């Protein structure tokens, strides 16, 4: 079967020597006999010049406009074919109109299916293929193309790694045929296919794609992320308004009941003591806060994550205490699988994983290493003086070798957020003032364009946030427009730029972080308000950040200045600064 081609790391305007290769590749795709060949080829090109929202940018990466301009300057049937597909994949209305006008003005005869591509429709059936242990699922959607062609996309969403797209591919066959073939090849009694609401499928796919773009380095295969533009185009055909992935709610009462049920069961016999209860609390914490949020779901993969990484780094304690975790885990796996009715063979495989990873685990917990919340969250700056179960470190808790260095790592994250050691030491929590938008340094020819973005930003802040956020957003927008006015000379949706401005300031102030107290908002709510895609927001933020001299980073937005931080964010930084400085 045909798979989308692997993406190029860079896309530049082809030279005269390169043009024949580009043209011949497109010509071969057009002659393939199925539209997927051309759709996959163009998808790989579009993905190649999409600026990564996180991680180091690729040098000299062209913009959408530059890529399209290259195709517009080469008046050939093959470039017209590419442009017809690009117009469908890009979510930029002005650019789409420009492309379509150019195609109409040319005299090239395109295949009928390609000329009618805007009339493609989603397949009637959407399917998810799931395994009982729940490490991930394949979401399967199809597209009916003009002239009777069909294609089907398979998106594997990994639940252990943050509910993100780990792999995906597209094949030239109907959904039902592919699902039947997948089940025949798998031949697994624990795997089943079930229909999925199309609106829910759209929400889940977009959510998982967005999270994958925020992972650095991103997972790659021969077909992913080269097929991402094609998947986004197909998913956008599904109806909106669906529900994405929902984490189960486990309050203290529910966890207490689960703890009592386990300790009073035959599986928990002899484990009702202080150490085992404390370790069980850690297992429940892992189960509820990581992966899909189900503390009764255990697989060989989750065992590997827990023993191979999470417990040795996350849980503070000496070796004698931590050494009890594998036996407790064995008992708890038996209890959970019994409660869920998991087949004995799968329980055996999961317990075998404990046996496989315990030797390394026992070695690691006896080695010098950082321990506790600081070791896990240093890069993200996501934990302050209060841990999930009270003050950290606990009174009398032994500090592992190397932990003394972790406070310095945490202080470094605070220095990056505010702009250095001096700024951190002088930090105060005075509220940001209500100040007007500064236009002095912005070129006059982009004033109108910037004003459109500003109006949307102000309205959002007035409706959902406050004066401090509005001031921070105004400052960021003003400096970005002054630093790189070309951003606002390109044709793009003002709503996307406005959403990106609010997203950057929200990220810098932990607005979307579920673990930080205070004001809360979901990124998807921000995206829905502005009517844009979540992936488009983070992508559009990249040039804005560069315009003020900030490089995009994995998972965090450190603007390096206090002028963008609200009083609540600065108060929290002060609290954490004092805590970690006291550890000296």
Image (cartoon, helix red, strand yellow):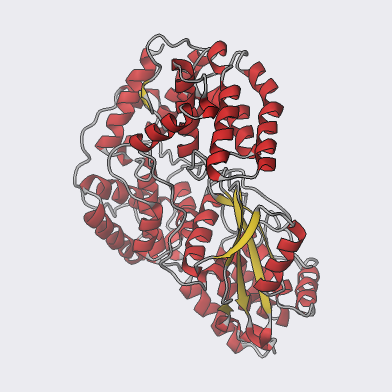
Quarter placement of the C terminus: top left
Q: Is residue 280 left or right of residue 349?
A: left
Image position of 577 (left or right of 98): left
Image quarter (top left, top right, bottom left or bottom right) of the N terminus: bottom right
Residue 299 placement (x, y as % from top left): 62, 40
Residue 401 appears in the picture as rendered: no
Q: Residue at the spot x=32%, y=66% of the render?
A: 448
Res. 228 image quadrant: bottom right
Asked where in the image residue 515 lies, by quadrant, the reply is top left
In this view, which residue lies farthest toward the front? 266
Residue 275 image position (x, y, % from top left): 47, 16
Viewer-closest of 12 and 573: 573
Residue 435 or 470: which is nearer the viewer?
470
Quadrant location of residue 397?
top left
Q: Is residue 207 above or below residue 321?
A: below
Rendered view: 329 above or below 154: above
Q: Pinpoint residue 291: horizontal percent, then vertical percent.
A: 52, 42
Please give the name of the residue rendered at 54% of the width and 69% of the height, measured from the top-left corner. 90
């Amino acid at each position: 079967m045909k798979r989308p081609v692997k993406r190029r790391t860079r896309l530049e305007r082809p030279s005269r020597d390169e043009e024949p290769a580009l043209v011949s590749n497109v010509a071969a795709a057009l002659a393939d006999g199925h539209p997927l060949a051309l759709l996959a080829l163009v998808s790989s090109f579009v993905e190649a010049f999409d600026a990564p929202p996180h991680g180091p940018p690729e040098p000299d990466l062209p913009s959408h406009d530059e890529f399209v301009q290259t195709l517009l300057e080469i008046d050939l049937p093959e470039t017209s074919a590419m442009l017809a597909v690009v117009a469908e994949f890009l979510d930029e209305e002005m650019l789409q109109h420009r492309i379509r006008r150019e195609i109409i003005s040319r005299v090239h005869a395109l295949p009928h299916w390609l000329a009618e591509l805007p009339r493609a429709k989603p397949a009637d059936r959407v399917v998810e293929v799931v395994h009982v242990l729940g490490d991930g699922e394949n979401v399967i959607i199809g597209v009916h193309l003009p002239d009777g062609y069909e294609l089907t996309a398979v998106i594997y969403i990994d639940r252990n790694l943050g509910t993100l797209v780990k792999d995906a591919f597209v094949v030239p066959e109907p959904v039902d045929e592919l699902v039947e073939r997948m089940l025949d090849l798998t031949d697994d009694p624990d795997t089943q296919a079930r229909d999925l609401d199309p609106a829910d499928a759209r929400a889940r796919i977009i959510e998982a794609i967005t999270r994958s773009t925020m992972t650095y380095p991103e997972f790659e295969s021969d077909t992913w992320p080269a097929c991402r533009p094609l998947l986004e185009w197909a998913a956008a055909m599904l109806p909106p308004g669906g529900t994405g992935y929902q984490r189960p709610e486990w309050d203290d009462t529910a966890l207490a009941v689960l703890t009592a049920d386990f300790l009073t069961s035959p599986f928990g016999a002899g484990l009702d003591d202080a150490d085992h209860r404390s370790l069980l609390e850690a297992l429940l914490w892992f189960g509820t806060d990581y992966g899909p949020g189900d503390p009764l779901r255990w697989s060989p993969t989750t065992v590997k994550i827990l023993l191979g990484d999470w417990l040795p780094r996350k849980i503070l304690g000496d070796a004698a205490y931590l050494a009890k975790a594998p036996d407790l885990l064995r008992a708890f796996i038996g209890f959970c699988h019994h409660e869920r009715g998991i087949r004995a063979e799968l329980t055996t495989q999961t317990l075998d994983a404990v046996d496989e990873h315990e030797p390394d685990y026992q070695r690691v917990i006896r080695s010098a290493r950082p321990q506790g919340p600081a070791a896990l969250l240093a890069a993200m700056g996501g934990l302050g003086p209060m841990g999930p179960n009270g003050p950290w470190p606990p009174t009398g808790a032994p500090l592992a070798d190397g932990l003394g260095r972790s406070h310095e790592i945490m202080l470094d994250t605070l220095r990056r957020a505010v702009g250095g050691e001096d700024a951190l030491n002088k930090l105060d929590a005075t509220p940001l003032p209500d100040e007007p938008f500064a236009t002095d340094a912005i070129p006059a020819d982009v004033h109108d364009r910037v004003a459109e973005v500003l109006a949307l930003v102000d309205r959002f802040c007035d409706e959902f946030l406050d004066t401090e956020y509005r001031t921070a957003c105004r400052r960021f927008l003003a400096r970005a427009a002054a630093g790189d006015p070309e951003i606002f000379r390109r044709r793009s949706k003002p709503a996307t730029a406005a959403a990106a401005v609010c997203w950057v300031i929200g990220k810098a102030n932990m607005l979307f972080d579920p673990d930080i107290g205070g004001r809360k908002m979901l990124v998807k709510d921000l995206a829905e308000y502005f009517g844009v895609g979540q992936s488009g927001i983070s992508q559009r933020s990249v040039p804005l950040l560069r315009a003020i001299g900030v490089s995009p980073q994995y998972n965090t937005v450190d603007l390096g200045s206090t002028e963008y931080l609200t009083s609540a964010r600065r108060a929290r930084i002060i609290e954490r600064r004092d805590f970690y400085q006291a550890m000296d």
